[in-house]
Image (cartoon, helix red, strand yellow):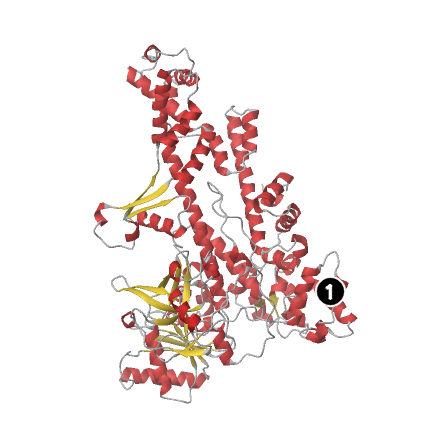
Amino acid sequence: MAIKEILLTQEILSDISNDLKLPKNQVENTLNLILDDCTIPFIARYRKEVTGGLDEVQIRDIRDKFEYIFALNERKDAILRSITEQGKLNPELQAKILSCKVKSDLEDLYLPFKPKKRTRGQIATERGLAPLAEQLLKQESSLIDLAPLFSSYIGKHEELTNLETVIQGTKDYIAENISEIAEMRKELRLWMFENAMFKSEVREEHKDKKTKYNNYYSFKEAAKSIAAHRLMALRRGEKEEILKVSFEFDEEIPKSMIASHVIKSTSSDVVKNFLTECISESYSRIISPSIETELRLETKTSAEEEAIFVFGKNLRNLLLLPPIPKRVVLGIDPGLRTGSKIVIVDGTGKLLDYSTIYPIHEEDLEKPKNKNSVEILLSLIKKHFVELISIGNGTAGREMESFVEKALETDKSLKPRIVIVNEAGASVYSASDIAREEFPNLDIVYRGAVSIARRLQDPLAELVKIDPKSIGVGQYQHDVNQSRLKKQLGEVVESCVNYVGVNINTASPSLLSYVAGIGPSLAKSIVRHREANGEFKDRQKLFEVMGFGAKTFEQSAGFLRIPGSENPLDNTAVHPETYSIIEKISADLAISVNELVGKKENISKIKLENYVTQEVGLPTLQDVIKELTKPGRDPREEGAKQTYNREVRDFNHLKEGQVLTGTVTNVTNFGAFVDIGVHQDGLIHISELSNQFIKDLSLAISVGQQVKVKVIGLDKERKRISLSKRACEENTHNATNNNTNVNRSGASSENNTRPNFRPREENKRPHSTGFSSRKGNPQSGTGRSTNKEPEKPASLTDLLSKFNSNRV
């Protein structure tokens, strides 16, 4: 049964509504749109009246919960068929199965009927011991002597040769029977989650060795509250055979819980003692390993969801770094032995030139190799009128930065600005199919430099070409469910691309493929059509693309921009379906649409309530007004200016107590990693982040943010740097009101902090369907502020100050 064909029953709608705490009509309307093949960005942006203004996170929650219920119902159908075929289904069992809301409860009910490999209990049944075991489980008060009963079964089967085999076979049957009591398993599962402790110990062979798991050599933490990153560390340490991980709890309590479901008040002492032995065997051999496995899996799933959630937040911040478009950029992929690769790209990202230089760092520029490298570098800058130099932050990045600075000092007429760019994933791109298609005749060694150059012009457009997992902003990304990670990160990229919008006349197939309703195949068709027929003149020309139908147009048109179109609305996020309303507004004001777009004095005359209809409500009209006010605007926020300490270019230059400025490269649940320009990111532990209490780390710091930090610890053996942002806060409060201070190196150190960008989906906590409600229900975050000053034409200096990695 296809998911589109499922009937939206009142029970399903009520379950989703109650679970997500949303009105039932909003859930129903949203699901109908999803089942009608509407995309989530489209629904969130252009169907606010239908959904009641739900954001992308809430819409995804509704979809995910619906898919869970759909899968659960399919599983119920399969289980009912299986039990029916066995001839064991009765009305009571059927009712219990149909009423299940959680998969684990459903599987508990199915466990006694589930086909199994040949078990010890089944062997006991084959030997004819089931009647004996069932008689004992009835626990009649008259049963006080078991020896005659057991003895009577000796010889009834060829394997039942003595009393011991009869007794053990009976125990095997009863132990298996006990382990399949659904209510008992549910109670025990919940108790284990609430009371079990994760315990880790170092393996004997690593006892005297120093590893990255030192903190876990003797460690305990409650399963219900263990931090996701610590659980992931335990699992990785166990996988690498450095740690032994187990659960610790009072085992007598689970046994007594089991006994309450098995032993009756009518039972004689003899039978009670025998059943107690069966309970002990059932617990140790079947129940405990099974429940512990479930607990491990549940806590692992919860930790993975949190890790994926953190990865998604970091990725979004990285993708939404501000661009510096329409500048000629010289990109450098630094290297040592194999040289540094140089490329030049024009304002649209087109490759103009490339070369390789072999500077010897720390030596005089007059040395032959250095002199030749300077000549090549300066000639390319002059030939192509380079405005920006983008240097990858990897191996030899700071050394190359120093070399370029010295080279530029030899010709004062050249004033390109140097920018340090995060090069994570550039090598992955260079070897990818996308890169080969873009540059079939360019050597692979230069493609990474192209990526580094283009990231400065438009981070989003370039980073979408790379597998998000290769960008390096994840937490234990290789240890989590890869299909779930891929889906989540794909949705983050889709959200970012549609939030910003795409110029259809310049976008690559990779970028277009993330536009709502398009996908990889159609994206390539659009680009082929563009190359064959020239630029699209207006949005209606999209219908000329093979495979671009009415539904695709509905879903995608509002996210596609066409600068220079005769209709100025084609370069805004206004959907073509509302063009007629704007035309009516302009007619009522006796002006043209061109005189309305971007003209605040005319826009201020509009009375929105006059244009509200059944199809178009106030929320859509308000969005239209925002677009008319700032047509074609790039919503990516302003960044901050990056300042590296010129005296600190290597780990050995660091000293405790130094105050440095760096860029946040990764945010985890235990802290943030910061690039301070020494090839090794430092860690701000959460305890060193702020003097104030921080409930949600992502509200205090984000990827791409510029921070001032103090070096508080150096581990030269393991190349670890401990930083403190908290230590700098007091200095900030006590500082004078001067806009610019001078740091120890004399480099400008401006107190520009990147404002936290809080898109609504970033405020969601991962949803768990686990042993208990470990995570809260997702909350709607704050929307983006629209109370900004009117934008002014940006100078090169303004654009540089917007980019997160600008080097002063």
Rendered-image quadrant of the C terminus: bottom left
Q: Quadrant of residue 181?
A: top left
Residue at 35% x, 25% y is 120
Q: Residue at x 51, y 28 (%)?
A: 83
Position of 785 with respect to 735 (left or right) is: right
Q: Is residue 705 visible?
A: yes
x, y (%) of residue 70? 56, 41
Q: Foreground: 342 or 113?
A: 113
Q: Is residue 697 above or below residue 100?
A: below
Outermost residue, front side: 734
Q: Secondary structure at mark 1?
A: helix
Q: Residues within 10 Å of mark 1 (few under 14, many from 20)?
A: few
Q: Position of residue 323 (x, y in %)?
A: 50, 72
- Determine the residue positioned at 59% across, 43% down: 18
Give the quarter of the figure containing the N terminus. Answer: top right
User: Where is 733 relative to 328, above or below?
Assistant: above
